[in-house]
């Protein structure tokens, strides 16, 4: 089955297996130096981070790249004083986590892999659980020479740490936006209330203590999930989860569980509980983002004409009426002109060359009109081959020069049709008001411009005509 690769940003294409080796070495050294003496790491994010990197940049997931990852982790252990045996074997366990998570998550569609669907969130949790099972099982094979714990305790220790760290760290790598997307979105204000509530709930969890206290932040996390992007929620779940794990490990929460099962410790129970705690907020964040995207698409479809990319008729009516209302409320009325444009002999284009060529002509004319108009002009497709333009600040006497420029720009177009060139022209009708005149309604302007357009067509097409009232004033 083919795997859909993720797009690699151009400014990150210098990443190479050597860079992957350096990243693995740095992360491993940081994780080793941060762990308690003679103990497994309290928090080992190396595996989750490297799995996320391979998923975002799959060209690095080669046998050479994976070998360099393992060599880097072994080198980090040896530099920090580990023996050869544990360094080789237990880093093979770490590599098993990376390979398992990468292999399982590289198969689903990109939307699932980027946690844009609830199924994708569950897939990430399942992959992290599978990777943790693989690592824990391999660790138990060689546990007897190096650990005093039972096989059950060793398995639970590895599984709980790998699973909890994976579900806290991996979503950040998978949902992180590209630098280009960040620049395109720009700086946006952030609502602080959900974030402050989360911080307060974490403080309350530590102050109150007890096993049930790890659930205190759930309401705040759900509010964050409904408010922020999945990437932001992933960062917050990592912050909340790691804070609770450290608090439990340092006995700040007086967390205890009945030792009904041999080898089950307080920290193992807390890790698994916290890992499952973040599942709900991540699913809610995914659903919330999907709803926002759907609403944005629906708003776009209601606002933008799908064929030309111009404003739709309904969106134009709303904006034009708003413009006319604001003109009426202004202390000094401003001039305004409305143009109706119609592609000449458009029906014959469709009949002679087909609707595909007709659609191409519509798109070409729309793009030409956009290029010729200023940003403050309203340009829309009313339907069929009809377009409308509103020019605020220009009276019809001045706007006629703009209309002529539009007419000539369209006339200069030549639509390729096989070996022939198809010329496209437009007829334009103008209506408007001067600063001394109160603004008519939009329907009145459209009717007057339509009459001028009718005369332009009756007098030979490919021409501009003003409304008769304005011509009499002149």
Image: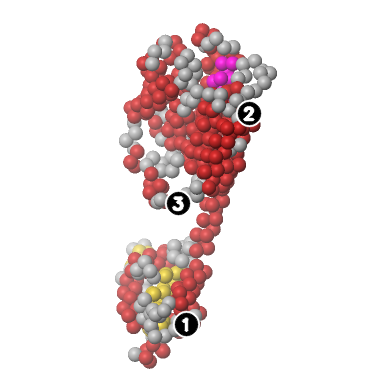
**Label 3 or label 2, whichever comes before in sequence order:** 3
In the image shown, does 213 or 433 lie closer to the viewer? 213
Q: Could you tell me which residue is drawn at 52 percent across and 52 percent down?
A: 293
Main secondary-structure element of the magenta-colored stretch: helix
**For the view shown, which residue lies furthest in the top direction?**
145
Q: Contact (CB < 8 A) between labels 1 and 2?
A: no
Residue located at (43% from left, 36% from top): 56
Q: Nearer the viewer, residue 136 or 61?
A: 136
- Foreground: disc 1 or disc 2: 2
Q: Which residue is mark 2?
A: 211
Furthest toward the front, the residue is 207
Q: Nearer the viewer, mark 3 or mark 1?
A: 3
6 or 349, nearer to the observer: 6
Residue 145 in view: yes
Give the magenta part as a residue range: 153-160
Q: Is 346 situated above or below 113? A: below
Judging by the rendered image, the residue that carries numbered circle 3 is 189
Whole-percent x, y for residue 37 in the image: 46, 16
Q: Earlier in the sequence, mark 3 or mark 1?
A: 3
Q: Is residue 394 magenta?
A: no
Q: Residues within 10 Å of mark 2 (few under 14, many from 20)?
A: some
Image label count: 3
* Quarter occupied by residue 61: top left
Q: Cα distance, mark 3 to mark 2? A: 36 Å
Q: Nearer the viewer, mark 3 or mark 2?
A: 2
Q: Which residue is mark 1?
A: 440
């Amino acid at each position: 089955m083919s795997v859909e690769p993720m797009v690699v940003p151009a400014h990150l294409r210098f990443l190479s297996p050597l860079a992957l080796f350096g990243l693995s070495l740095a992360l491993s050294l940081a994780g080793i130096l941060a762990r308690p003496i003679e103990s497994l790491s309290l928090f080992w994010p190396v595996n989750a981070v490297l799995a996320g990197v391979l998923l975002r940049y799959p060209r690095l997931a080669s046998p050479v790249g994976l070998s360099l990852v393992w060599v880097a982790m072994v080198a980090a252990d040896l530099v920090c004083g580990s023996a050869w045996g544990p360094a080789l074997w237990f880093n093979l366990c770490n590599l098993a986590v990376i390979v398992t998570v990468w292999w399982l998550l590289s198969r689903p569609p990109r939307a699932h892999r980027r946690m844009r669907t609830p199924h994708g969130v569950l897939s990430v949790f399942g992959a992290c659980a599978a990777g943790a099972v693989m690592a824990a099982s391999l660790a138990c094979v060689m546990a007897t020479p190096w650990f005093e714990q039972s096989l059950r305790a060793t398995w639970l220790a590895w599984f709980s740490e790998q699973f909890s760290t994976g579900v806290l760290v991996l979503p950040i790598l998978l949902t992180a936006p590209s630098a280009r997307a960040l620049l395109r979105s720009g700086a946006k204000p952030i609502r602080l209330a959900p974030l402050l509530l989360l911080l307060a709930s974490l403080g309350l969890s530590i102050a109150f203590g007890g096993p049930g206290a790890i659930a205190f932040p759930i309401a705040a996390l759900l509010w964050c999930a409904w408010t922020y992007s999945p990437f932001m929620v992933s960062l917050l779940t990592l912050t909340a989860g790691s804070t609770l794990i450290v608090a439990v490990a340092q006995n700040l929460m007086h967390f205890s569980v009945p030792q009904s099962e041999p080898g089950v410790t307080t920290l193992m129970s807390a890790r698994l509980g916290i890992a499952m705690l973040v599942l709900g907020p991540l699913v809610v964040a995914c659903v919330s983002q999907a709803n926002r995207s759907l609403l944005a698409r629906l708003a776009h479809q209601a606002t933008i004409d799908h064929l030309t990319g111009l404003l739709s008729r309904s969106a134009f009516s709303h904006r034009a009426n708003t413009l006319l209302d604001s003109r009426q409320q202004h202390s000094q009325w401003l001039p305004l002109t409305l143009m109706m444009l119609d592609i000449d002999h458009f029906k014959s284009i469709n009949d002679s060359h087909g609707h595909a060529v007709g659609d191409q002509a519509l798109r070409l004319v729309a793009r030409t009109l956009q290029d010729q108009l200023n940003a403050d002009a309203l340009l829309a497709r009313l339907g069929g081959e009809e377009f409308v333009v509103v020019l605020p600040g220009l009276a019809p006497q001045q706007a006629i020069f703009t209309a002529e420029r539009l007419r000539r720009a369209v006339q200069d177009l030549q639509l390729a049709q096989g070996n022939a060139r198809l010329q496209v022209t437009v007829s334009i009708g103008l209506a408007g008001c001067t600063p001394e005149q109160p603004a008519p309604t939009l329907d009145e302007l459209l009717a007057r411009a339509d009459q001028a357009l009718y005369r332009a067509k009756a007098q030979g097409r490919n021409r501009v005509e003003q409304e008769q009232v304005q011509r009499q004033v002149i």
